[in-house]
Image (tube, rainbow, N blue to C red):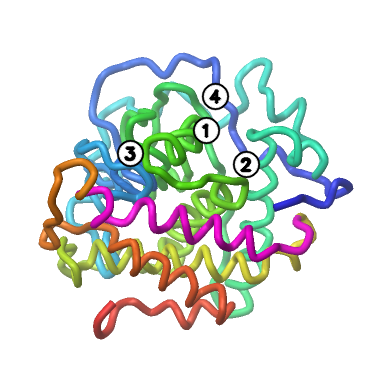
Amino acid sequence: MTFDPNAKLDPSQVEDRRGASGGGAGAFGGGGFGRNGFGVPIVVGGGGAGLVITLIVIALYVFGGAMSGPTSSSVPAGSAAAYDGAQVDGSTVAQSCRTGADANSRTDCLVVGVVNSVQSYWSNELPARGVAYAPADTVLYSGATQAGCGLAQSAQGPFYCPVDKKVYLDVSFFDDLHTRFGAQGGRFADAYVIAHEYGHHVQDLLGLLGRSTANTTGQEGGSVRTELQADCFAGVWSDHAVQTGYLEQLSTSDIAQALDAAAAVGDDRIQQQTQGRVTPDSFTHGTSQQRQQWFTTGYQSGDLTACDTSKGNV
C-alpha cells in the first residue's frame, strides 16, 4: 500500500496521547480488534478476538443491540475527564504527519492517512444514503489512556468506543498482529484494522449498535454478526480507497495482507492457539473463513447494502 506522496494529510483527525500519562485504575471500555478482537467496546468493554485475544473483560455492543455496552450512565465517574480531545504537548502526528510521503515512511502517519481516507469515503457515502456522517477521531496512545468507555489498555487491542465516538489504538498492536497472531503483517493489514474499527463507527451512525436485541455469542450470535459486518464495511472502503485521493492503486498483495490479517484473528484460530480447542458457542467475532468471506463481500461489491449480516447464516 502506497500513499500518494503529494496527498495532504489532516492530522487533526488523530489525537496523539503518546507520552501522556494514562493514569488510573478502573474499568476499561473497549474490546477491539485485538486482544480480544476487533471489537466494539463492551465493559463493558470490547470486541472479542478482533485482533488480539487475551481474555479481558469486554462488553460488546452487538449488531442489533447492546447487551451491556457502556452508556453515559454506566461510565465510571471521571473516566474520560483527564483529556479534552486536544493534542498533548509535542504531539508527533501534528508536527510530522502532513503529506502522503510522511505516511509512506512512518507508521503513525500511516494511521493518519488511513483515518483520513476512511472518513473521506464514509463522509460522502452516508449522506448520499440520507445519513449524516459525524467524524470520529482516532486516539493514539502507549500503554493506557482514559476513554469514554473507561480505561483503554494496550492489552485490549484497538477498539471503538460508542460513548465518546472515538477509535483507540496503540500502534504496538500492529507488531503483535504479526508476532503473536502469526499474520504476515504489512501496511494494508494495518489499514484493515483501522477500517474495521471505523466500520463500528458507521454501524453506530446507522443505529445498528444500539438496537436492543439479544447480543449473544456463538457462531450465529449477534456479536459475531456485528464484527463480520464491520469486516465487510472495511472491505467496502478498500474498494473505494483509491478514489478518496490518498492512496495509489492497491495491489493483489495488499488485499492478500488484509485477508491474512482477518484469518489470523478468527475465533477458531485464536482459540486453537490459546486453549488448544475450538468452542463455537463462545465465538464473538467469527471464524477465519467468515472474516475473510465478509471482507471479500464488501471489497468485491463496494456496497454497504451487501453487508447485511443480520439475516440467515453468516
Which residue is denoted by mark 2 in the rendering? 111
The residue depicted at 24 percent of the width and 57 percent of the height is 268
Residue 219 visible (yes or no) = yes
Which residue is denoted by mark 1 in the rendering? 171
Residue 58: horizontal and vertical position, in percent?
23, 43
Position of the C terminus, as image quadrant, is: bottom left
The residue depicted at 25 percent of the width and 81 percent of the height is 313
Q: CA distance from mark 4 to mark 3?
A: 17 Å
The residue depicted at 38 percent of the width and 65 percent of the height is 291
Which residue is denoted by mark 4 in the rendering? 17
Nearest to the observer: residue 122 or residue 298: 298
Q: Is residue 280 left or right of residue 6?
A: left
Q: Nearer the viewer, mark 2 or mark 4?
A: 2
* Majority SS type along the magenta span: helix
- Residue 264 is a magenta residue: yes
Q: CA distance from mark 1 to mark 4?
A: 12 Å
Q: Is residue 107 above or below residue 247?
A: above
Q: Secondary structure at mark 4?
A: loop
- Whichever of callouts 2 and 3 sits on the residue coming sooner in the sequence is 2
Q: Amino acid at mark 2?
A: Val
CB-based contact (under 8 Å), mark 1 and mark 2: yes
The residue segment tinted magenta is: 247-271
Residue 212: horizontal and vertical position, in percent?
21, 67
Q: CA distance from mark 1 to mark 3?
A: 20 Å
- Whichever of callouts 2 and 4 sits on the residue coming sooner in the sequence is 4
- Whichever of callouts 1 and 4 sits on the residue coming sooner in the sequence is 4
